[in-house]
Amino acid sequence: MASAVLAGGAVARAQPTAAPLQIEYRAEAGCPTEADFRERVVARLRRPLGEADAANAYVVTIEKSDRRFTGRLGVRAADGAASDRDVSGDTCDDVVAALAVVTALAIGTHAADAPASAAAPAASASASAAAVPPAPVGGERPRPPPPVPAADTATRLTLGAQLLYGAMVGPQAIGARLFAEPPVGATDGDIGPLRFHADLEVSSDIPAAGGSASFRLAAVAADACPFGAAYGALRLAPCARVEGGLLSASRRGDAPVRSAARGWLALALPVRARLLLWGPLVLDAEAGIRMPLLRDGLLVEGAEVVAAPPLEGVSAIGLGWAIP
């Protein structure tokens, strides 16, 4: 009986083991080793390797170029079929982690119930790795990783300045504006739905009461832009504005300069345009109409200078900077 037991033990020890993965691994100095790469692949599989896993050969190559690392996984099936997948990242460890995920997905059997954490290392690699799922190998098609949302300048505080041009109480006017958009979300066109700004406008001279007159407007305003549209890098949004401040008039002639001031209240309907230039820098412009609500003329020592018209044109152009 003892000999039978020993013979049985010898037979058990003689049982063949599962063939190892066929991996050809080449990487830059300082990158994780082949053994580390194999361990990461097995960790992603969450199961022991079997003989069927050795049916395909995997060629892994990692190179460094311009301070970034690029990795390639070549899958060579037993029937001669071949597919390649490229990833890139800032560090070699990121690329190796992403390639381990892609290799585990290529092995295929665990794709249907893979945990969501399996895609985490790939997020630190290039978007090209996240956007292209590995080709199906020997069975079920793997699920692609979820897309990474693009950066949105309208969900950050945006500060900027603009030059103004238009009409004010009749004559042409120029001015300057400082504006701020709080990070309260974005319209469909990626423009902040709220904006607050402070304006200073100065009109050209017009004949008035035996001399000439000019106007100066200092106002603060709030814009609401509930919806918009995007056309490539261009964003458009119609807005509604309410503004209030102080309007002053100065009359000049044979007599000394005289001035007067009164309150200012107006509504405006501008259309805003935003062009994404570079990173957080944007070109911001607008054009529209303004409707003064206080239209009584200004009286300077008994002489009426001018009354505001029912509609005025407004336009502006400038630059903005989105702050993270």
Image (tube, helix red, strand yellow):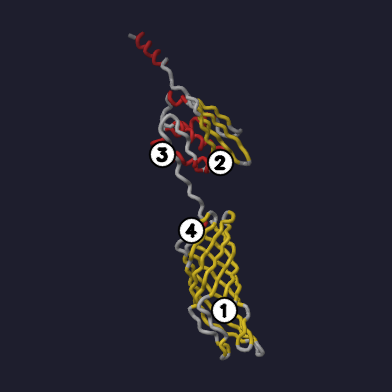
Q: Mark 2 points at which residue?
A: 89
Q: How crowded is mark 2: few (under 14 residues within 10 Å), some or many (20 or more)?
A: many
Q: Residue 158 in the image: state x and y as whole percent.
A: 54, 61
Point 47% across, 60% down: residue: 228
* Label 1: element kind: loop
Q: Which dot, 3 or 4, sits closer to the camera? A: 4
Q: Mark 1 points at which residue?
A: 170
Which residue is nearer to you in this view: 71 or 40?
71
Q: What residue sits 60% from the left and 35% below the top?
A: 63
Helix, strand or loop status at disc 2:
strand
Residue 141: image location, x then y, percent: 42, 35
Select label 3 or label 1 by which is in front.
Answer: 1
Amino acid type, label 1:
Gly
Task: Choose between 27 and 78: the one closer to the eye.
Answer: 78
Tell us which disc is closer to us: 1 or 2.
1
Say whether disc 3 or disc 4 marks the residue closer to the N-terminus.
3
Q: Which amino acid does label 3 sit on?
A: Pro
Q: Return the disc, 2 or 3, that comes first in the chain's sequence.
A: 2
In this figure, which residue is indicated by the disc labeled 4? 229
Indicate the quadrant containing the N terminus: top left, top right, bottom left or bottom right.
Answer: top left
